[in-house]
Amino acid sequence: MSKTNGKFLQLSLHLEKKKDFFIEPETDPFSKNPQYESGINQLYYKMNGSSLKEIPHVILFLPKEEEEKNLTQTILDALKPYCEQQINFNHNEIAMNRRDGFEVLKTGLIAALSFFALMVILFVIFPNSELVFYLIIPIFTIASWVSIWRPVETFLFEAKPFKRNIRVYRNMMQMNLTIKYE
């Protein structure tokens, strides 16, 4: 469950064991509350699907037998390095995409410039040809655009999901956690 409460995004998680917060639980489909994902993954999905302007307030429901002194702080302390690792992973993905973008940009620009050069040559050789003007030039124009589309797409769009992931994990590091025992 999730709901917005002013500056806080209230989320609730029901887990069978405290370790299920980080580790994917063993699934019991006959349980009254079957778990298919770890708590951290559930939290990630809920936060990723919401506005990241709000600080998450997570209410973690655990069975009474899981009660432990300072469990809230233990989970928050374990959460920080996990989130930092995920943030670093996403920064690396952005860097790899940027590197790939520059590689395909070189190829795309060479192809686009080649098509442009061919268009100029055809205009010089056949200055009054309708075939060149109405058929060949548009084909080369489209081919030029296709050759640079991949680099443009890489630089404009491919980093967005990774940047959002970074924001999710930064918000997760700032979350408030309350544990309630059922």
Image (cartoon, rainbow, N blue to C red):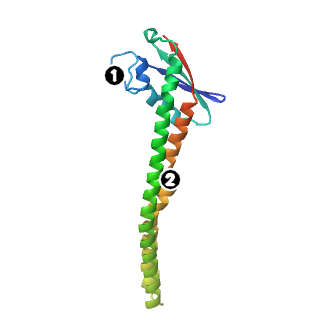
Q: Three-letter amino acid code at disc 2?
A: Phe
Q: Amino acid at mark 1?
A: Thr
* Residue 67 to residue 146: above or below: above
Q: Position of residue 78 (x, y in %)?
A: 48, 26
Instruction: Give the residue at mark 2.
Output: 157
Q: Nearer the viewer, residue 19 or 129?
A: 19
Q: Nearer the viewer, residue 66 or 151?
A: 66
Is residue 44 something one can see in this rendering? no
- Residue highlighted by disc 1: 27
User: Who's the residue at 44% across and 31% down the image?
Assistant: 41
The residue lying furthest to the right in this view is 6
Q: Position of residue 33 (x, y in %)?
A: 40, 18
Marked residue nearer the N-terminal end (2 or 1) = 1
Asked which secondary structure carries label 1, the reply is loop
Q: Position of residue 68 (x, y in %)?
A: 48, 12
Residue located 42% across and 84% down the image: 131
Q: Is residue 170 above or below residue 14?
A: below
Q: Is residue 9 above or below residue 16?
A: below
